[in-house]
Amino acid sequence: MNLCVVGTGYVGLVTGAVFADLGNDVVCVDTDAEKIAGLAAGRVPIYEPGLEEMVARNAADRRLAFTTDLSAAVRRSEIVFIAVGTPSKADGETDLSAVEAAAKDIGRALDRYTVVVNKSTVPVGTGELVREVIARHQVTPVPFDVVSNPEFLREGSAIEDTLHPDRIVIGAPTQHVAMTLLELYAPLGRPMIITDVPSAEMIKYAANAFLACKISFVNAIANVCELSGADVTQVVKGMGLDSRIGRDFLQAGLGYGGSCFPKDTDSLIHTAARHGHDLKFLRAMVEVNRERAGHFVETICKALGPLDDKVVGVLGLAFKPNTDDMREAKSVEVIDLLLAAGATVRAYDPVAMDNARRMLPPSVVYCGSAYEAAEGADAVALVTEWNEFKFIDLERLRSVMRRALVFDGRNLWEPERMHRLKFEYHSIGRKPVIPS
Ligand code: NAD
């Protein structure tokens, strides 16, 4: 099939590359001319395992192309995906300006029947808005349909998730329109849910809010564990083996960040309020998440004393492992608080340092490795649980530090091991290890 993907970010680029890999002819469109020029020259602007190779392979085979010319791309396509960003406004409402701008341009370009698919995460009712915007800007009054096909990929495993999604949700106005998407996705052989547009839009928010709640729930339990002497990792094991609960998304830590959970929970709360409903429990879960970084830095201050003349090595900056995405990364909050308390921060991340430089205060010292970040440090704070850190040589780490003190924001290391290695070790929801 001839496809067009509008918006060439984490979702759009991965979607375009995977559809091309499945044998479709895909044109990816973006308003960012620099990004498009880079992609056309073979430069992938984001870190995502396997993406560079997939883009290169399909571009070389001429199944994947990049352009800023939305009009030409739309006119050659049977299906047009909208995969532009939908950030939050200050009050939690979703900013739909990019979606509306894309819809407007698509409306102007349409010259024959086309299926327009919303892949961006948008509040319930946006399908209707997109339909109305397209209709209002049509130059040639040809029929079209708007479908909701929310995306569930996770950064860091985006290709794998796109090739093997747990389910594919298709919200379409009629069965006939849904068939177009069904046919496109058939090669993946994954379960598909065919539903109406508003339900598909809501599925995405309900799923993300539920996952965010699992994370906040376990973090709230971790707080109680810290106060009462229980071990949250044991608690989670005992809870997670209950098949009604499951172990996924029950890791205590610094909470969720990234470009989805924070904005999607805020958006759902805002949508509910717009309909006159107060989603109190979700507001409470969001609050639990907001307190995580502050709680972590408080623990650091308690153990280390005033931070004025202290050096803290921060390991991991990306909002989670295997991505360079810094949007809503907990590292930003943690580092801001450490700096405000007077600490000197030496930071290292395997791939997110370029993006981090654009977001963090200039006083942060960037280092070439975890060992370099720990050099002369009074403490190391682990913020992102990269595998590289899990398998780090902890003895070597200790040997370069001024003081053997570790704060583990993701429960990456085992307290027994840290005890054996003579670290003072503070983690989340577990008893601290204090060397005798
Ligand atoms: P992104 O910010 O990485 O990419 C968005 C791209 O859209 C940018 O390259 C931008 O230049 C481009 N763009 C903006 N306006 C445009 C326009 N009018 N025409 C053409 N291009 C335009 O965003 P993302 O992370 O890929 O997210 C896209 C959507 O997918 C969001 O709604 C997000 O909530 C949702 N989503 C994201 C993820 C994720 O893990 N990143 C997962 C599931 C769903």
Image (spheres, rainbow, N blue to C red):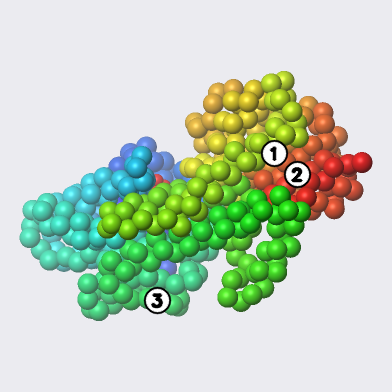
* Most distant residue in the front direction: 228
- Report the residue at 58% width, 75% height from top: 244
Mark 1: give few (<14), some (14-19) or many (20+) Cα within 10 Å.
some
Residue 3, given in percent of the width and then of the height, sits at 30, 62
For label 2, the SS is strand
Q: Is mark 2 within 8 Å of ligand 1?
A: no
- Report the residue at 72% width, 47% height from top: 427
Question: Which is closer to the viewer, label 3 or label 1?
Answer: 1
Spatial CA span between label 1 and label 2: 8 Å
- Report the residue at 23% width, 49% height from top: 100
* Most distant residue in the top direction: 309
Residue 299 bears which disc, if any?
Answer: 1
The quadrant of the picture occupied by the C terminus is top right
* The one of 219 and 150 positioned closer to us in this rendering: 219
Question: Which is closer to the viewer, label 1 or label 2?
Answer: 1
Question: Which is closer to the viewer, label 2 or label 3?
Answer: 2
- Report the residue at 85% width, 53% height from top: 416
For label 1, the SS is helix
Q: Give amino acid for label 1.
A: Thr
Left or right: residue 129 versus residue 20 is left
For label 3, the SS is strand
Q: Is residue 368 visible?
A: no
Disc 2: which residue: 426
Mark 3: give few (<14), some (14-19) or many (20+) Cα within 10 Å.
some
Mark 2: give few (<14), some (14-19) or many (20+) Cα within 10 Å.
many
Residue 192 bears which disc, if any?
Answer: 3
